[in-house]
Amino acid sequence: MATQDEVPYVDHPLLVPDFIERRLYQIRLAGTARDSDTLVCLPTGLGKTTVSLLVTAERLQEVGGKSLFLAPTKPLVQQHADFYREALSVPDDDIVVFTGEVRPDDRAELWESAQIVIATPQVVENDLVGNRISLRDVTHLTFDECHRATGDYAYVYIAERYHADAADPLVTGMSASPGGDEEAILEVCANLGIDEVAVMTEDDADVDEYTYDTDVEWERIDLPDEVLAIRDALNEVITDRLEKLKSLGITNRTSPDLSQKDLNEMRGQLQRMMNNDQSKGYKGMSTHAEIMKLRRAVELVETQSVEALRRYFERQRNAARSSGASKASQRLVSEPKVREAMRKAESFDGIHPKFSKTRILLAETLGIEAGERVIVFTESRDTAEALTDFLSESFDVRRFVGQGDKEGSDGMTQKEQQETLDAFRNGEFEVLVSTSVAEEGLDVPEVDLVLFFEPVPTAIRSIQRKGRTGRQTEGRVAVLLAEDTRDEAFFWISRRREQEMEDELNALKSAADEIEEELDDSQQSLDAFDANGDSSSGGGGTATASADAAGTDAATNGSGDTGGQPGLTDFAEQSTDPEPTDASDDPATDDMDDPATTDEASASADAEEGVVARAESDEDGTVELVIDQRELDSTIARDLSTRENLTTRLETLAVGDYVCSDRVAVERKSVSDFLDTLTGGDRSLFEQIGDLSRAYARPILLLEGEGLYEERNVHPNAIRGALSSLAVDFGVSVLRTTDEADTADMLEVLARREQETSDRSVQVHGEKSSKTLAEQQEYVVSAIADIGPVTARALLEEFGTVEAVMTAREDDLLEVSGVGQVTADRIREVVGSDYER
């Protein structure tokens, strides 16, 4: 391998000189990705973001326009932005970051002036639906961690819009692990509009030069008798609950080690029974929920720690005491054998063997072997907390967890996460104890040991974890495996799935090679990558020895102003289709958030700010439909935003969900929501409809779904009475649709009829009616657990004020009609207890 002084760099007008190291496999991948919509697959840590950067630089230089780079979390977005600003010779202000923390109006303005936008997908999705931005001028779109492009994830919608709207589109998808089988990989490609798959593995000669062996050591652990006794007590209860399901005809199995697949099948059967209004379906579902809670407890004590189990039990006790607690939670904490397990967990004062083994492995790595850094991964935040405390007695340790408040633990802010990673990179501490937030794309330095506190049953996550070591030096991966526990099952599942993924990638690679063989010689040659014009055969991931030699000579012996080092302009002038490969990046892959939590936060940021979209249609004859921000949870807004001559605009609507004109607004209710509003809720159906009818001359209730009279145990005449009142008392038209697609069609017809046929304009108005003082007082009192509106009114009538209710003595409370001992105790507990988080 070349020394640092001999390392060649890529030359290009838009790249900072002597910054991007010239790696032949990255150049080849960039050549493929420059010419086609390409999925780039490369082991973690080998520079797939660099590949996208090279393509972006070339597209901006040759085609112009702007580049959009999407990453699933805010920390990843910021990390990519930092890398792009370091690597590209464009003004830093031209590289902008879009997350939910940036106001929508500001994003619309920044979009117009930016050359490169790096964003979370949810924010871009919202801006497209709200017509704040246009993808027309985007000439390169990158989807980082593109294996997420399935189902309703924002990547799928954005890709559809991009291919439809862009004048000159080019897509690059990047992932170290695109899917567990060929079908999953092909689904990702179809959803992103990708027609080339470039795959490289560590076996390829070009890649092998930059990798070292990573051995996986399986450390088997025997659990002590005290821990096994806790597990066995919980398993006895699981067996008992399975016996109950068996008596209902749901299952023939009563062994507690049944698979998750078996449990899912039971749940499906119970759901069908509930749909048919069979009472034993409801009873069985509650028992099933109890089994799931017990299995989680068993998993914690077997594979995590007794401390994690103690924290879990505490949350279950709190849940059972809370307002609206499920019967499953209440039965769980009152079950004698569960209470026995709780007592044993509380009295356990030993060290879990996994904790001891972790300390031994760290001592070997950091002490005897003079290592510098270690990452410990665990599935449980409780374990991460306890493990950090335990290891801190012997090592310099910090935790790394997600942003949300999960599992009874405070999360970390984005700033705290970034500071922790920076300190780890700078060698300020030795051990990083992390939950799964650090698995996917996290840019941390190479480490001497990656320790899995438990096996990971998902191939993608396992591969990404192991990608944290072996990038620049030889590294170790150790996995702790508790004998005769779920760890064993996860071990075999992980082994099987990783092998399946490797087989599928190799199969795809072979298929890609066959395709390349049919391309003409100009696309096969390396002329496109060589400043000297030297040609070499062989493409993609299985480059021949002669190709390697030619590439190396070109890098070190070239002539000219660039010192023989190839620039992107060299391969831009000829069409190229190198062999399939895959890359991942050093300074640009950082996943610090739980993905679901981060995307939801991004999606809801606009609604929380109460922002009104300002975008206006600039096409004559285009119909505009205003949509409430909260409707983004459904697919309707996305569907409508893709329709020809229909412009969608997002606002935080005070009244209604959709505005079709100055006189027509629509309140959308699913059948379930409609029935919920008849039986309770903060704002009743009639309150909402009253606001709507006062604000718009033609209010509409759009009732979506089937089973209006069958779904709930609500008397049909009660439903008919509600519908009659809506029509007669409020003058509201009630329209029925079958599903979200049907709703979108209906909304489009309504908007077109109003704006095209009736020539009406769109105007948003109306406000929610405010609660009266009496209603607000009733609301405050009824917020206490176990107190409904009737009891709240009785308390207020008795004591006169909210303050008097809150300060009343228990004996006085019991004198009020509808207030029993439990309710009285709960009022005093809520009002008189110290606040603790």
Image (cartoon, rainbow, N blue to C red):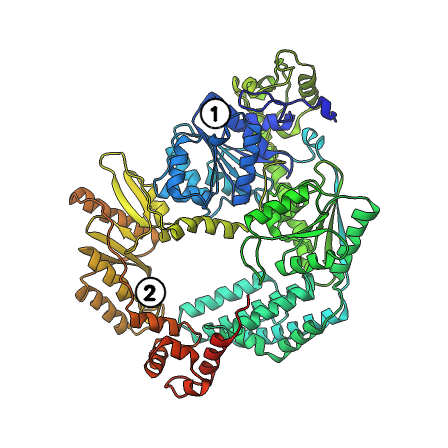
Which quarter of the rendering shows the C terminus? Answer: bottom right
Q: Residue 209 at what x, y percent from top left?
A: 72, 30
Place residue 752 in its image quadrant: top left
Q: CA distance from mark 2 to mark 1?
A: 54 Å
Q: Does residue 298 show up? A: no
- Callout 2, which amino acid? Gly
Residue occupying the point 34% across, 81% down: 794
Residue 561 percent across, percent down from the top left: 61, 12
Q: Nearer the viewer, residue 222 or 17?
A: 17
Q: Residues within 10 Å of mark 2 (few under 14, many from 20)?
A: few
The residue positioned 34% from the left and 83% from the top of the image is: 798
Pair 2/1: label in front: 1
- What x and y, as percent, mark residue 803? 39, 76
Which residue does the numbered mark 2 point to in the structure image?
707
| Quadrant of residue 10 within the rendered picture | top right
Earlier sequence position, callout 2 versus callout 1: 1
Tell me if 136 is positioned left or right of 409 in this view.
left
Residue at 33% x, 63% y is: 671
Give the residue at mark 1: 60
